[in-house]
Amino acid sequence: MKRNGSVRRVKVSADGEGVVSHAGLGMLREVAEDTGLVEALDGALADTYRGPWIHAPGRVLTDVAVAVADGADAITGIEVLGDREGIFGPVASMPTAWRVLDRVDADHLGAVRAARSLARERAWAAGAGPDLSQELAIDFDATITIAHSEKENAAATWKRTFGFHPLLAFLDRPQIAGGEALAGLLRKGNAGSNTAADHIAVLDMALAALPEHARPRPGDAEGPRVLARSDSAGATHAFAAACRKAGVGFSFGFPVDLRVQDIVDAVPENCWHPAIQTDGDLRDGAWVAEVTGNVDLSAWPAGSRLILRKERPHPGAQLTFTDVDGMRITAFLTDTAPGVVPGQIAGLELRHRQHARVEDRIRQAKDTGLRNLPCRAWNENAAWLEVVLMATDLIARTKLIAFADHPTLARCEVAAFRYRVLHVAARITHGARQVRLRLDRTWAWATAIATGWGRIRTAFT
């Protein structure tokens, strides 16, 4: 075939020097170091070594997390850092990383979580924290992670697949694409979606992951306000009681059964109020109504309220037998008192509807190592889940500190963030007793990356 000459051919050789790709990973490694995550993980795993280590366990685990943030879905991904010692310094080999991961057994998993909590506190103090005068929303949801080979405790799932069913909790941070990963519980594939004990365990871990000054104080009306949001899988009496005991409000999806359907038929038309959008405008074709007095909620914590929403289904949506007169009916249960959230019941419905953002958090987590649990042993996969949560947090903190005023980078999803920031090419130069990393000046986001890198260093000085 004859070439048309439209593509210019260049001479290719493998003899470049002083060039580094994926240079933006250095930002994540510095965030891990500056927040104290590396040091805290060293302390958490120090007793798993019989003698001095060559590669500190905290550095090894955070390097695996950085590789996962870069798109790796197995421990071998750490090798992407290994041949860039000029910018990253010494990096452990894949067998060393595997051994460190294996050392994170059930006895040390709590210490690893405590190390992540300490790093979060320092990151928030450096400028990555939310506005604590506003309500913090913790979103709970479970997802299926498919196992393609025999792995310990992998089992058949309710979706007729085979693998695991981890339950996750994310702190909603709408100013960036992707929330903060507070907690995750690795579970067998056949674990129930509405297992109250698992939700309570993840709630306890999520609250422990918050800095102490951001945790709710039961009985203290002046303390931080925290809300637990979930779909109907979290709507259990035990989980609601645990939230009340911890001083956490709740907003749970509520199953629309025949009892609720009968209530829908009885609600007068003038009791339905228009739903609202995030910007405060009315949501076309959607209405909300409170039916607390029409159903027995005595088994739920005092002050619980049941709110219905009806909406015209989008084109192509499949209606169910619980839908009424061609309207899609949903319900949620909350213990938020009247007047606390602007917009009355429409504001409560908007707040609950924003729980759907957790689907984006999980989707991005699956693009950041959660799609594959690569190890055979249960404890290694549980440690891998913590690494995925670390990677998610490193990206979130980098965005919050470095790119808060750059929406193109702060709000882009992880795949775009890798392309724009983490994979930037650069050249290493030496002069005046300094090592300099010179980003490709033709890269569209080079100036923003260099500025953001400087902000990270300033934030922790």
Image (tube, rainbow, N blue to C red):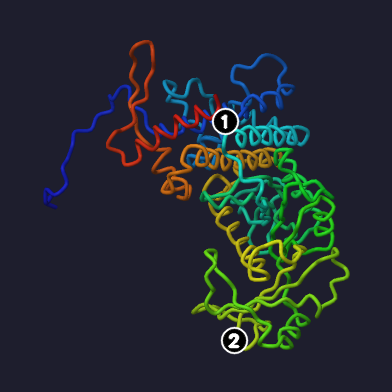
Q: Position of residue 287 (x, y in %)?
A: 61, 78
Question: Compared with residue 394, is residue 436 higher up or lower down, i.e. above or below?
Answer: above
In the rendered image, the residue lying farthest to the right is: 298
Looking at the picture, tell me which residue is in the foreground, 43 or 134: 134
**Tag 2, which secondary structure?**
loop
Compare marks 1 and 2 and give the one earlier in the sequence.
1
Crowding at mark 1 (Cα within 10 Å: few <14, some 14-19, many 20+): many
Label drawn at residue 221: none
| Above or below, 245 relative to 438 | below
Residue 320 position in % (x across, y down): 64, 81
| Tally of marks | 2
Q: Nearer the viewer, residue 72 or 439?
A: 439
Placement of 115 over or under 276, stated as above or below: above
Amino acid type, residue under disc 2 in the picture: Gly
Label 1: which residue?
A: 32
**Residue 364 left/right relative to 225:** left
Seen from the viewer's position, the closer of residues 39 and 241 is 241
Identified by mark 1, the residue type is Ala
Which label was assigned to residue 326?
2
Pinpoint residue 155: horizontal percent, then vertical percent. Answer: 70, 55
Q: CA distance from mark 1 to mark 2?
A: 52 Å
Residue that appears at 71% across and 61% down: 340
Assess disc 2: are there few (<14), some (14-19) or many (≥20) residues with their C-alpha within 10 Å of its C-alpha. Answer: few
Task: Please report the residue visible at 72 percent of the width from the left and 66 percent of the height from the top.
Answer: 232
The residue at 48%/21% (across/down) is 89
Q: Secondary structure at mark 1?
A: helix
The x, y position of residue 279, in whole percent, is 52, 64
